[in-house]
Image (cartoon, grey):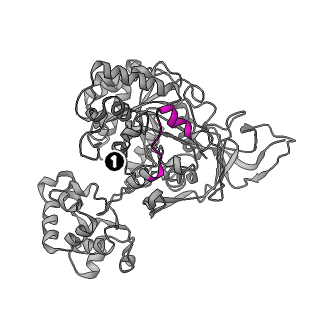
Amino acid sequence: MLDLLIRAGAVVDGTGAPSRHADVGVRHGRIVTDVDGESATRTIDADGLVVAPGFVDVHTHYDAQLTWDPTASPSIYHGVTTVIGGNCGFTLAPAGPDHADYLMRMMARVEGIPVDALSSGLSWDWTSYEDWLGRFEGDIAVNAGFLVGHCALRRSVMGAEATEREAKDDEVAAMQRLLADALRAGGLGFSSTQSNTHNDAEGRPVPSRVATGAELIALAGTVRDQPGTTLEFITAGCLSSFSDDEVELMTGMSLAADRPLNWNLLGVSAANPDFHNHQLAASDTAAARGGRIVALTLPHVMRIRLSFLTGFVLDGLPGWRETLHLPVAERVRALSDPEVRARLAAGADSPEAGMLRGLAKWERLDLAETFAPETAAFAGRSVGDVAAERGIDPFDALLDIVVADELRTGLHPALPEGSDEDWRMRAEAWRDPRTVVGGSDAGAHLDMMCGAIYSTSLLGSAVRERQLLSIEEAVRQLTEVPAQLYGLRNRGRIAANAHADLVLFDPETVGHGPDRTRNDLPGGAARLYAEAFGIKHVIVNGVEVVADGSATGASPGTLLRSGRDTETVHAAG
């Protein structure tokens, strides 16, 4: 007898093959494709629904959240059944309790996870990577695997000096031993960052940014010895343009590990096609030498949210930092002062503001979310509209709302969705074998965005509305492609005896809502959250974890351990 029978759905199996109407069975957590004559304990009528493999998100920061939220919300509601954490060099282990304060404040700074949530939601009593990793066994609703972060390795070995100097040979060797132990315990690989946007709570470069290329190559080489592992890396050129030295370093890391190296995040624009073509050329350079470099790219225009409460990005405007770092009550008073307003406006519109000067076109900011009764009518409108209605200067209109909201106002810089040519080129990039659709950053930057929408955005916007991809190709990009990059055993496809990770969705309504603030983190801390539409059922290892948009409370997720749950993907394929 089957545990579950899914009847009459449009099966899109993850391979890119044409959909077919068929029944799919589940027995003992595995998929059964030949269900003729089988009875079942439970049946789901999937008429009108697509039945697809569960989506695989390879770039998340759910390391902390999964300890208090086994569903990895809201990703699970957007059809994601497998998440990979520990990206960008940022993990909570193997550094132990002696480093808790530094790691919490660093994570709050670089990944936008509130310190209150990290301090009250985590025990911070692990003694090793294995001790930390084992806490997820049998207690998560999604499948989850984790890389081993360079910053925690460096901090464990070098302490406070990790942010101050190059490592000595014996310290690199100690990091290699710690990494090897973590990989043997089940870590899925090694991650690091050298991005100049990654600074700790004191404004210093995070530990991995002080590492030499030789240290990175040595640690990548350690990955080679553990089956089923991989590399993830962020460098300054990911945002600007890769230098020859950066391409050489990434290629060297891939060759040392004999593994693919993925990086985040490829932007695509018809206005500057040379940029993304240059970035993708790094993959060709690596391939010519037997390595592999893979770019992650998003299927939607990433809209970040700004606020005068966090001050992130805004505090980069000339003369703004001092004001935006005042305590909240003092900041509210300062932003009400005409002289302070004049000084801030002048700084934002000065040549010294550089690329951020565009923010000084205040009338173009959208008021994404407001919080006070007197500002409720302004939500969803532009600052320019409100200013015109009130007959005042746009900057004054903005700050009047911000002050009334006690700084919580959510602001979206005006970003065009792009031309038809932009979208055509983006779709071309999604299909490129040098890329993987992903880069959600789900679980991080909680004050700026909700990256979990990437899957429902692809299916709703790119497939249904813009018709840029077939539904079969879109599902393949969300399932088989990322699963193969990480060597996930028997996941990413609907096939006989594969793990029964499944999502059933309505292709006519699948999509997502706008990001909205929720104060549901430990300690009452806030995050941005976006609802999913059209995702009817989510099944992990044969057990339903989401039914009609609500979590069932089941925790059937597998803690993915390297070698056991992953197979080796070599750099040369």
Instruction: Determine whether 383 is above or below 116 in the image.
Output: below
Regarding residue 207, the answer to whether it shows in the image is yes
Which quadrant: the N terminus? top right
In the picture of the structure, the residue carrying the numbered disc 1 is 105
Instruction: Determine whether 568 is above or below 134 in the image.
Output: above
Q: What stretch is highlighted in magenta?
A: 120-135
Considering depth in this image, is 46 or 128 the residue closer to the camera? 128
Place of residue 314 in the rendered image (x, y in percent of width and height, measured from the top left)? 25, 58
- Give the residue furthest to the right: 37
The kind of residue tagged 1 is: Arg
| Secondary element at image label 1 | helix
Place of residue 104 in the rendered image (x, y in percent of width and height, measured from the top left)? 37, 46
Left or right of 365 in this view: 52: right
What crowding class fits label 1: few (fewer than 14 Cα within 10 Å), some (14-19), or many (20 or more)? many
Residue 217: which quarter of the image? top left
> Magenta segment: does it hold 126?
yes
- The residue shown at (39%, 70%) is 380
Tally the numbered discs.
Answer: 1
Place of residue 124 in the rendered image (x, y in percent of width and height, measured from the top left)? 45, 43
